[in-house]
Image (cartoon, coloured by chain):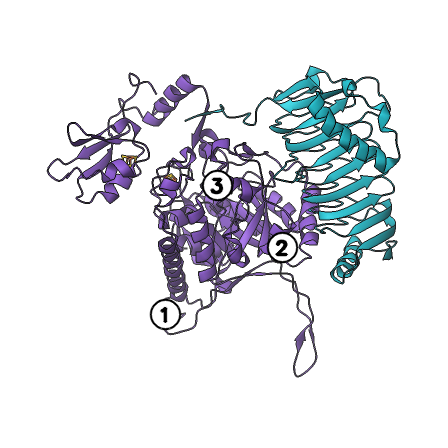
Amino acid sequence: MRIDAEGLHYRELNEQINRAVEEGETQFVLDHVLGHRYIGAGIGAGVSFDINGIPGNDLAAFMNGAEITVNCNAQDGVANTMNAGKIVVHGDAGDILGHSMRGGMILVRGLVGYRCGIHCKAYGERMPIMVVGTTAGDYLGEYMAGGMIVVLNRDDEQGSPVGRYCGTGMHGGSIFIRGAVEDHQLGAEVAVEPVNDVAWKTLQAVIAQYCGAFDLDPGRFAAEDFVRLYPWSSRPYGKLYAY
Amino acid sequence: MPEWLTQAEFVIERDPERCIQCKVCVRQCANEVHRFDAELGEVFSDSDKCVGCHRCVSLCPTNALSVRQVELDFRSNANWTPQAIRNIYKQAEQGGVLLTGMGNPEPLPVYWDRMLLNASQVTNPSIDPLREPMELLTYLGAKPTRLKYEGGDEPRLETELGPQLELQVPVMFSTMSYGSISYNASLALARAASEVGTYANTGEGGLHAGIRPFAKNMIVQVASGRFGVDADYLNAAAAVEIKIGQGAKPGIGGHLPGEKVTAEISATRMIPLGTDAISPAPHHDIYSIEDLRQLIYAIKETTRYRKPVGVKIAAVHHIAAIASGAVRAGADFVAIDGYRGGTGAAPTMIRNNVGIPIEFALAAVDARLREEGIRQDASLVVAGSFRCAADVVKAIALGADACYIGTGALVAMGCHLCQKCYTGRCNWGIATQDPYLTRRLNPNIAVRRLVNLLESWRHEIKEIMGGMGINAVESLRGNRDHLRGIGLTDRELNALGIQMAGE
Ligand code: SF4
Ligand code: SF4
């Protein structure tokens, strides 16, 4: 189904989509999308969206298995509390990408803004994966409780591809960063190690998916260019209280 | 705590004449106060560990036990209270943040007790609820400013009404998560709510599979940790509540320690076993009223505008402006939690010192929303220690649509307010996950007690309303004419928007 979003309020657009999904439609092409919020909110597996234009905030909020391709940039709040599904952004994405995301995958060709992957968590089979093509802003992976964040630094940025307060309050999951990251950029709860063989296997598989999505050569990424951030403890505040 | 610094807070007295050495107390006390000495064939007690929960006292078959507060545990000093001294000893020993449970116990004024209700005499007849109809039905949700009808003889409502929660009694069970309380306690609250026709609230604990059958009487919470939150969870419930703050600990996050994250809790919250469940202090996708609106509408979109979406905030300074912002952000109801609100665990300093009384918060918010002409856009639910039906009636007269009760509901299930919920060793089987202790709370009995409580309050509310000559809760709402203050200053009377007794 093809929908021209021009002139539609987000509520009308989403209503059209929801009605069509209820009637069994599984493939959508949305044209002239311009800041329409909440596209894909709560939508389950088996439905896919091809978005032409710039979708608005909270794209794929609470999404439950659908697949979204954005052929441009995305705004803030992509995949807010997403449970499952896949999002490919052929451009940059704004702040708070993947907030409290529990499962699924987000691949961003370019950079992402501040506060991405905050409180991203994993549960059982569900394991959220977020790959950023170039750089990420401050507070990446704050309070991270599970899952995997990868910053590829494809443009070989001088300095660090991540900002400050990276992984503050982290108590689960891992963040892979290609390039430099200084101690002062990291939260106190974070430990850094080189990428070992086991981790590299996992990372390589994710990079392969990323390169597949954007038609890039995975051969240029090597384990020794990455560091892995992980939490010291799954109970960072276990000793905070007097009983 | 080193024994050379402090003595026990409670003293246990065992009447040797009555004690039959049956060992009930030994089995009942999870704090291991009572101990049976097999050689001597006698039960002994170590008062030091007693928290004063009265479980042993209540269950002793021969009434041999009594537990008393030690009267002169420190040399008396009105400034350096025993609690203040104890806290310092504890922190000097362990070096940590003081933790506590339940609501603020400090001797601060309870303004409900300084407001009195009206009754009809001569000029306006009172109504007898036993013989005349009395309407307590309450709807929570945005109301339209005007109604449009279509058609002549058989008019049809043309105005589209937003989703509403229907309450048979203007009292709901407040946020209590599975995790902070036991499964049996959560189940009892959900079942009682559905039996009475009101709502219970999941808190941040997720919706346990066993509680899903009662989901149409559940409000589900979306808090900063987003535990257990997915599209199914939002769509299963009657309404969704975004938790911004909580009266017992405004401004700070939550923290369920890893040792309490059992297999069942991990499945319900959808988090790994044994890790800390950390709720950040703010929602990191909400830094402004606009952001709040964005989350409200993300939830409305996900639930296809079929569920009311509320916002829960703690009563703090400038509460009226904050509540007004929440209403303008699109909240269908705003829940305000006063500084006496209970909790499973909170830092003592925060619980005892942060926030404002619900009475002032409610008066300010209701007045402000009326002034701004947006009172109908959202319902007001108030929380923070409603102890009886009269408190509820006073709150409604002050402007509330409904009240949340948390502590009151736990007391109905047997809680003795020992304030030790954070230890996870609740001897009454409520605030614990230890299977040996949780079995003590029989959900069938707990449901009956909760239903009894709400039924009796329902009757009392009707009786009080009847006495005022009011036959529908709608006419009581915001009717401050029916309240009078005693022992209040002019400022206080003004802030509450009520007159003084005698006027
Ligand atoms: S803690 Fe409770 S059960 Fe144990 S001795 Fe004290 S009052 Fe009795
Ligand atoms: S719930 Fe249990 S631990 Fe908490 S105050 Fe009541 S009796 Fe004590």
Q: Position of residue B169 (x, y in %)?
A: 46, 61
- Which residue is under mark 2? B235
- Reading the chain from its start, which is encountered first: label 2 or label 1? 1
Q: Quadrant of ligand 2?
A: top left
Question: Which part of the image, by quadrant, shows the C terminus of chain A?
Answer: top left
What's the CA distance linking mark 2 and mark 1?
52 Å
Which hue is chain A drawn in?
cyan
Q: Residues within 10 Å of mark 3 (few under 14, many from 20)?
A: many
Is B473 placed above or below A171 here?
below
Q: Give me the chain that's purple.
A: B
Q: Tell me the residue that label 3 is attached to.
A: B179
Question: Which label was assigned to residue A166?
Answer: none
Q: CA distance from mark 3 to mark 1?
A: 54 Å
* Residue A113 in sight from this viewpoint: no
Residue at point 67% right, 76% down? B156
Q: Is mark 2 within 8 Å of ligand 2?
A: no
Q: Quadrant of residue B422?
A: top left
User: Looking at numbered disc 3 in the image, what kind of residue is underneath it?
Assistant: Gly
* Proximity of marks 3 and 1: CB atoms separated by less than 8 Å: no
Q: Is B350 placed above or below B191 here?
A: above
Q: Position of residue B222 (x, y in %)?
A: 60, 45
- For the residue labelled by badge 3, is the local secondary structure a helix, a strand or a loop? loop
What amino acid is found at the position of numbered circle 1 in the picture? Val
Query: With B110 as the anchor, is B380 left or right in this view?
Result: right
Q: Are marks 3 and 2 in contact (CB under 8 Å)?
A: no
Percent coordinates x, y for residue B482 in the rendering: 44, 58
In this figure, which residue is indicated by the disc labeled 1? B122
Q: Nearer the viewer, residue B53 or B426?
A: B426
Q: Is residue B167 visible?
A: yes
